[in-house]
Image (spheres, rainbow, N blue to C red):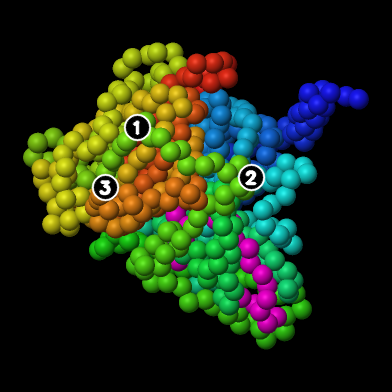
């Protein structure tokens, strides 16, 4: 009779072989180049991947290795970021310019290669240079490996819903104009669903400009909702239908039933929708959540249509329209964001680390930068100055001659400093709007300041909104990691009372968190992946202004916790 130890050995060996057999190499080629499209009465030349908007969806299974050959045939520098992918020991493939790599120059190419480990659900990919992600983006869908199931009933179909933003202009020109004048950039002209604005906009009554999907009555569909917009959070509803949230940012949640979903730029939300209404046509629609008071924004609505098969023609010609929340409906936004909880025991669930090594209190918000030479008051920002942004009074500036990850790996000095503070250098009443335009607080120095963290350290961050220009909900995205959202609320964080609100049992797990307007959010993560990882506001109007920092995570004690050398073809600066 075989010994138990022998049987256990073979069981483990067979499991390992099965796991290896289920993994595959998934290969794609991206040709990034000009594409002429018609939108809103105009023919525009945009930058796109493989001639489509959105770009191609990537489908993989957990454990697969993804290889993407990127040929930059556009007139702009380019990188691709794989939003939400951990990049375990493959930080060179993360993509943000001057953080993990230098840009792919026009006429050049680069191959991204990484293995997707310990993740399932909806993520996405996008350009990470200037505003190119407005049109250079697509879904990245990770299904369970062979033999594994979703922790919810298998849906009849899966439908990617990519919410975007459209300008009747070259988006690089829009950004450059704002940076030149110091003012806020021009608002977008429309929102889109899967690249189409919908029939509420001028010149969009042709059905080809409205995303339409035929559904069967009585079936359940998995909507994979992605907010690829640059500067606006979006409410999303489907007329007459409830949705059940089952995952956010590729992390499973306890089922949460709602008639409205809020997605910030960068976030993803998976919902189950059952077609249990009368046979007909129903609009899906998205409109902005704009939390900053007295700030202009694109206050329009995009919509698509779900059409039941065999629906009466009269119903198809007059789809039902949902009633969307008001643009400033913060109670609805907060209810949705704060009611989500993680599904304990789900695939890849990670418990909350209980011991904290690094406590950080970090202010986030807008400020000002001097216009230029003394006496020059011609800039377009408030008080004739330039709009700026900062975290803990440090306005982040990207390096230009070497990426931070290269400087870390090769121990090159002068690229960044490790003096990002654990708390604001000056304590003040952060959300008191009487501090708006406080000249003693509103100017932050430009610097490439990072936080250095030991391998495996647990970091807790209290992210605190400020009112120096205006309070606003800031979607903060951390590269390379998921984090637990322990709590969120309004006003200034109060350690005596607010720590009692921490959910240490089943908090939601995300890679992008909307810090409440005039409020705070507490996140916690374990720095178990060496490399350089940017944390930044995913409103693209704010990243160039400096609302960012980076974590430099040291190598661990073993080869399996040490960052390997860069690929030989890594782009140079």
Counting from the top left corner in percent of width and height, residue 450 is at: 33, 28
Number of other residues with Cα within 10 Å of mark 3, as a class: few under 14, some 14 to 19, many 20 or more: few
- Kindly report the distance in space between the C-alpha atoms of the residues bearing marks 2 and 3: 33 Å
Residue 568 placed where, x, y %?
57, 16
Report the residue at 38% width, 21% height from top.
401
Q: Name the secondary structure under disc 1.
A: strand
CA gap, disc 1 and disc 2: 28 Å
Residue 279 shown in magenta: yes
- Identify the residue shown where x is 44% and y is 47%: 504
Q: CA distance from mark 1 to mark 3?
A: 16 Å
> Looking at the rendered structure, which numbered label has been put on residue 86?
none
Seen from the viewer's position, the closer of residues 1 and 250 is 1
Toward the right, the furthest residue is: 1
The front one of 506 and 326 is 506
Q: Nearer the viewer, residue 377 or 157?
A: 157
Question: Judging from the image, what secondary structure is the residue with disc 2 in?
Answer: loop
Q: Quadrant of residue 445?
A: top left
Q: Earlier in the sequence, mark 2 or mark 3?
A: 2
Q: Which residue is mark 3?
A: 495
The segment highlighted magenta reads: 262-288
- From the image, tell me which residue sits under label 1: 358
**Can you tell which quarter of the image residue 316 is in?**
bottom right
On the picture, is 555 further left or further right than 158? left
| Residue 251 is at least partly visible in this image | yes
* Residue under numbered circle 2: 347
Counting residues from the N terminus, which is met first, the one under dot 1 or under dot 3?
A: 1
Quadrant containing the C terminus is: top left
Give me the residue at 57% from left, 49% from top: 344
State the predominant SS element of the stretch in magenta. Answer: strand
């Amino acid at each position: 009779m075989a010994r138990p130890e022998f049987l256990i050995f073979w069981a483990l060996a067979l499991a390992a072989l099965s796991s290896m057999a289920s993994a595959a190499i998934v290969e794609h080629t991206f040709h990034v180049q000009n594409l002429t499209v018609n939108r809103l009465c105009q023919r525009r030349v945009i930058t796109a991947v493989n001639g489509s908007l959105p770009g191609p969806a990537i489908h993989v299974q957990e454990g697969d290795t993804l290889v993407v050959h990127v040929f930059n045939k556009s007139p702009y520098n380019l990188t691709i970021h794989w939003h939400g992918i951990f990049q375990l020991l493959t930080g060179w493939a993360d993509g943000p310019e001057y953080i993990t790599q230098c840009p792919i120059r026009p006429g050049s190419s680069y191959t991204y290669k990484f293995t997707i480990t310990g993740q399932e659900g909806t993520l996405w990919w996008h350009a990470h240079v200037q505003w190119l992600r407005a049109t250079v983006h697509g879904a990245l869908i990770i299904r369970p490996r062979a033999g594994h199931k979703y922790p919810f009933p298998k849906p009849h179909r899966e439908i990617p819903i990519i919410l975007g933003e459209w300008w009747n202009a070259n988006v690089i020109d829009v950004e450059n104009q704002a940076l030149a004048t110091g003012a806020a950039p021009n608002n977008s002209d429309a929102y889109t669903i899967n690249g189409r604005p919908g029939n509420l906009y001028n010149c969009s009554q042709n059905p080809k400009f409205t995303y339409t999907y035929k559904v069967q009555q009585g079936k359940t569909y998995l909507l994979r909702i992605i907010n690829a917009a640059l500067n606006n959070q979006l409410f999303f509803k489907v007329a007459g239908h409830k949705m059940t949230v089952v995952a956010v940012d590729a992390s499973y949640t306890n089922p949460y039933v709602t008639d409205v979903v809020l997605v910030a730029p960068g976030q993803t939300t998976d919902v189950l929708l059952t077609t249990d209404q009368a046979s007909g046509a129903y609009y899906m629609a998205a409109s902005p959540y704009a939390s900053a008071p007295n700030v202009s924004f694109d206050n329009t609505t995009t919509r698509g249509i779900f059409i039941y098969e065999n629906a009466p023609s009269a119903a198809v010609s007059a789809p039902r329209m949902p009633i969307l929340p008001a643009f400033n409906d913060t109670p609805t936004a907060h209810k949705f964001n704060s009611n989500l909880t993680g599904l304990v025991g789900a695939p890849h669930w990670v418990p909350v680390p209980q011991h904290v090594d690094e406590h950080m209190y970090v202010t986030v918000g807008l400020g000002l930068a001097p216009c230029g030479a003394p006496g020059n008051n011609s800039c377009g920002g408030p008080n004739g100055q330039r709009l700026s942004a900062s975290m803990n009074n440090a306005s982040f500036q990207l390096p230009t001659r070497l990426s931070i990850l290269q400087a870390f790996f090769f121990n090159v000095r002068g690229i960044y400093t490790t003096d990002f503070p654990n708390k604001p250098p000056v304590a003040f009443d952060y959300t008191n709007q009487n501090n708006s335009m406080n000249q003693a607080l509103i100017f932050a120095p430009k610097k490439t300041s990072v936080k250095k963290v030991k391998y495996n350290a647990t970091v807790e961050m209290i992210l605190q909104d400020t009112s120096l220009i205006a309070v606003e909900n800031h979607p903060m995205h951390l590269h390379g990691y998921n984090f637990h959202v322990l709590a969120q609320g309004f006003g200034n964080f109060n350690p005596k009372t607010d720590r009692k609100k921490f959910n240490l049992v089943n908090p939601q797990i995300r890679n992008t968190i909307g810090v409440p307007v005039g409020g705070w959010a507490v996140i916690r993560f374990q720095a178990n992946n060496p490399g350089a990882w940017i944390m930044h506001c995913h409103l693209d109007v704010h990243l160039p202004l400096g609302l960012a920092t980076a974590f430099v995570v040291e190598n661990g004690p073993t080869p399996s916790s040490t960052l390997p050398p860069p690929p030989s073809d890594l782009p140079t600066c």
